[in-house]
Image (spheres, rainbow, N blue to C red):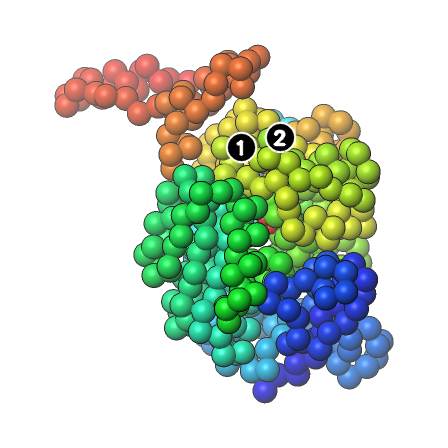
């Protein structure tokens, strides 16, 4: 048994509910805002339930050498920070997390920022950061005896949910916007056995529809409005801190869609600071696509106090979201950590993605907004060359191969989108070439691509 000590606290009005009693849509009955998981025992200094920072650091390192299934998960390795289950035996894991932190030598040199790294969450079992949140929330679904789980998705959540449901022996219902998600992600949901509905609406419409469905049927909602998702998604913060020997980087740059991931990472760093695991937190900045930038507009118009939904358009389909559910939480993270909220154009995203590809890493277009955002922050003087910066890459490059191929073939961007950046874009393109089956023809292509 585990010391299950958590409760849910409304982010808006502060109302607390004992752990299991949230409504099926995870909205507060009083004010309609979202919940956060909190651990009351942690606030009592010297209390029995407050984890000891030094002992935890030692324990978590030890577990890296363990062969126990829970220890091999980069989420449950830190389980003292997410005591949400009655029994850890209910954890559903695919050995998520423990993702690599890569130095970016080319971008470092180009930008003059020596300490520039990418935390590649695309290296998770289903190829995106969603696995870290799915392991925690799916475990709750199993522990509470649900048969069905469901999500609306731009693709990655559905891929992760379908996989974890299959592992847990639960049935999965997926709502996706028809024609607006990358094939790689759709193929995953199908392969892992989800009931997949392509709905004639956008992501925001799918989520709205699903909320009506879960109010009528006994189905566990696994979108990131579910606060248990964020408990798993906060764990990359622990991995990042551990990788820097508990001296956190100066900046963390995260893509923004439904805005749960930035909220979760902010919570992870905040809790580490509260427990004395780290002395400070990084500035957390959120980057959206220019065509799907409601939080950027919110910061411009009301300093993050109010939000107007937008009709979202971007080829970075993962973050094609106009009405983000967790915007209040993300706005608080940006305020509390001294970060920024900014956006990137379609050309900036495509260029940044090709540059990350040229580092030998690659990522989804939605992840590349982080490098595009870094360039802008540096140009504004918000990030100095001596500072340490971590970009959070959220999805694997193979999730959306069509985007990459279109970029390298030169068919991705319109002339208007490319305007003024044609040379830069052409310099990054590496189209496949048709070559005769002779050595001389192959060698001739080498000469043609010298330099
Ligand atoms: N990057 C990728 C690759 C994503 O799939 C998402 C969100 C984000 C960034 C943004 O994260 O929503 O927490 O701000 N994808 C969701 C999905 C919406 O359905 O897969 P966020």
| Residue 170 coordinates in the image, percent (x, y) | 41, 71
Quadrant location of the C terminus? top left
Callout 1: helix, strand or loop?
loop
Which quadrant: the N terminus?
bottom right
Vertical position of residue 363 compared to residue 38: above or below: above
Q: Which residue in the structure is indicated by mark 2? A: 290
How many residues crowd mark 1 within 10 Å: few (<14), some (14–19), many (20+)? many
Q: Residue 63's quadrant in the figure? A: bottom right
Element under disc 2 = helix
Give the mark, 2 or 1, whose residue is nearer the N terminus.
2
Q: Is residue 380 visible?
A: yes
Task: Tell me if mark 2 has few (under 14), some (14-19) or many (20+) residues whose alpha carbon lies within 10 angstroms of its own.
Answer: many
Task: Give me the residue at 45% from left, 69% from top.
Answer: 148
**Residue 254 appears in the rendering:** no
Q: Are marks 2 and 1 in contact (CB under 8 Å)?
A: yes
Q: CA distance from mark 2 to mark 1?
A: 8 Å
Looking at the image, is 158 positioned above or below residue 109? Answer: below
Q: Position of residue 141 (x, y in %)?
A: 52, 72
Asked whether, in this view, residue 423 is left or right of residue 441, the answer is right
Residue that label 1 marks: 314
Give the x, y percent position of residue 305.
81, 44
């Amino acid at each position: 048994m585990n010391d299950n000590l958590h409760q849910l606290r409304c982010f808006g009005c502060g109302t607390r509910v004992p752990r299991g009693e949230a409504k099926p849509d995870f909205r507060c009955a009083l004010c309609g805002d979202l919940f956060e998981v909190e651990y009351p025992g942690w606030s009592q200094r010297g209390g029995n339930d407050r984890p000891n920072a030094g002992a935890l650091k030692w324990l978590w390192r030890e577990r890296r050498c363990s062969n126990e299934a829970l220890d091999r998960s980069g989420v449950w390795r830190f389980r003292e920070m997410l005591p949400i289950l009655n029994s850890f035996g209910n954890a559903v894991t695919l050995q998520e997390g423990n993702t690599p932190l890569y130095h970016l030598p080319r971008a470092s040199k180009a930008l003059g920022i020596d300490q520039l790294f990418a935390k590649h969450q695309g290296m998770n079992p289903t190829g995106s950061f969603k696995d870290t949140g799915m392991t925690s929330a799916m475990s709750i679904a199993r522990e509470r005896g649900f048969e069905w789980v469901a999500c609306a998705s731009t693709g990655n959540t559905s891929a992760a949910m379908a996989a974890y449901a299959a592992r847990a022996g639960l049935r999965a219902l997926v709502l996706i916007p028809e024609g607006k998600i990358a094939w790689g992600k759709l193929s995953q949901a199908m392969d892992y056995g989800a009931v997949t509905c392509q709905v004639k609406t956008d992501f925001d419409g799918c989520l709205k529809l699903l909320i009506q469905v879960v109010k009528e049927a006994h189905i566990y909602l696994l979108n990131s409005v579910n606060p248990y998702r964020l408990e798993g998604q906060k764990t990359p913060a622990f991995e990042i801190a551990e990788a820097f020997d508990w001296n956190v980087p100066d900046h963390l740059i995260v893509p923004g869609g439904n805005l749960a991931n930035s909220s979760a990472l902010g919570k992870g760093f905040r809790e580490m600071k509260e427990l004395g695991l780290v002395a400070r937190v990084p500035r957390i900045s959120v980057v959206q696509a220019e065509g799907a930038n409601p939080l950027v507009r919110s910061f411009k118009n009301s300093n993050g106090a109010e939000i107007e939904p937008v009709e979202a358009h971007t080829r970075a389909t993962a973050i094609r979201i106009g009405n983000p559910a967790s915007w209040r939480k993300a706005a608080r993270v940006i305020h509390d950590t001294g970060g920024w909220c900014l956006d990137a154009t379609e050309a900036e995203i495509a260029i940044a993605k090709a540059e990350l590809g040229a580092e030998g890493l690659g990522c989804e277009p939605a992840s590349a907004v982080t490098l595009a955002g870094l360039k802008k922050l540096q140009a504004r003087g918000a990030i100095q060359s001596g500072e340490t910066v971590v970009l959070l890459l959220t999805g694997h490059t193979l999730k959306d191969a069509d985007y990459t191929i279109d970029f390298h073939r030169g068919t991705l961007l319109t002339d208007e989108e490319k305007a003024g950046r044609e040379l830069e874009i052409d310099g990054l393109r590496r189209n496949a070439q048709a070559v005769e089956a002779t050595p001389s023809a192959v060698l001739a292509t080498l000469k043609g691509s010298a330099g």
